[in-house]
Amino acid sequence: MARPNPIEEFQDTQQMLVDYAKQETVEPLKDLGRYVGVGMAGSLVMFLGVFFLSLASLRLLQSFEVFSGGSWASLAPYGMALAVLLLAILIIYQIMSRAQEEVR
């Protein structure tokens, strides 16, 4: 029976270690990068959607005759739009905290 060549055995071991390192470090980092990229794109789209919806609601409120009067009446739509945004943030926070408690 022939004895294995130590150089070939070392090269096989080295290749196995390199493959294992790639499998356990590089591939998970690539997956993590994909998740972060999709998350960033989603958050940007959500931000733009909320921004344009709040701007549209502000312009809609400003179009009513009630808010065309003095300085208080012209500031009221801004306060209302801000209140709606703060309410939406509060609702989202409540939903996220409940979901986080369920995970635990």
Image (cartoon, rainbow, N blue to C red):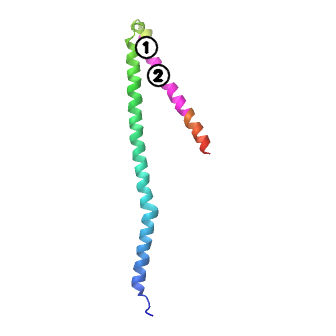
The verdict on residue 61 being magenta is no
- Crowdedness near tag 2: few (<14), some (14–19) or many (≥20) residues, C-alpha within 10 Å: some
Marks 2 and 1, Cα distance to the nearest angstrom?
Answer: 11 Å
In the rendering, which numbered label is found on residue 50? none
User: In which quadrant will I find the C terminus?
Assistant: top right
Instruction: Name above or below for residue 24 compared with residue 101.
Output: below
Instruction: Name above or below for residue 37 compared with residue 7.
Output: above
- Which residue in the rendered view is the most extreme toward the front? 1
- Crowdedness near tag 1: few (<14), some (14–19) or many (≥20) residues, C-alpha within 10 Å: some
Q: Main secondary structure of the magenta part?
A: helix
All told, the count of numbered labels is 2
Residue lying at 42% horizontally and 7% vertically, measured from the top left: 66
**Residue 29: x %, y % from top left:** 43, 56
Residue lying at 61% horizontally and 41% vertically, measured from the top left: 101
Span of residues in magenta: 74-93
State if disc 1 and disc 2 touch (CB < 8 Å): no
Circle 1 — which element?
helix
- Which residue in the rendered view is the most extreme toward the bottom? 1
State which quadrant residue 23 falls in.
bottom left
Residue lying at 59% horizontally and 44% vertically, measured from the top left: 103
State which quadrant residue 90 falls in.
top right
Q: Which amino acid type is shown beneath numbered disc 1?
A: Leu
User: In which quadrant will I find the N terminus?
Assistant: bottom left
State which quadrant residue 54 falls in.
top left
N-term-proximal mark, 2 vs 1: 1
In the rendering, which numbered label is found on residue 82? 2
Q: Which amino acid type is shown beneath numbered disc 2?
A: Leu
Residue lying at 41% horizontally and 39% vertically, measured from the top left: 42
**Residue 34: x %, y % from top left:** 40, 50
In the rendering, which numbered label is found on residue 75? 1
Q: Is residue 57 left or right of residue 89?
A: left
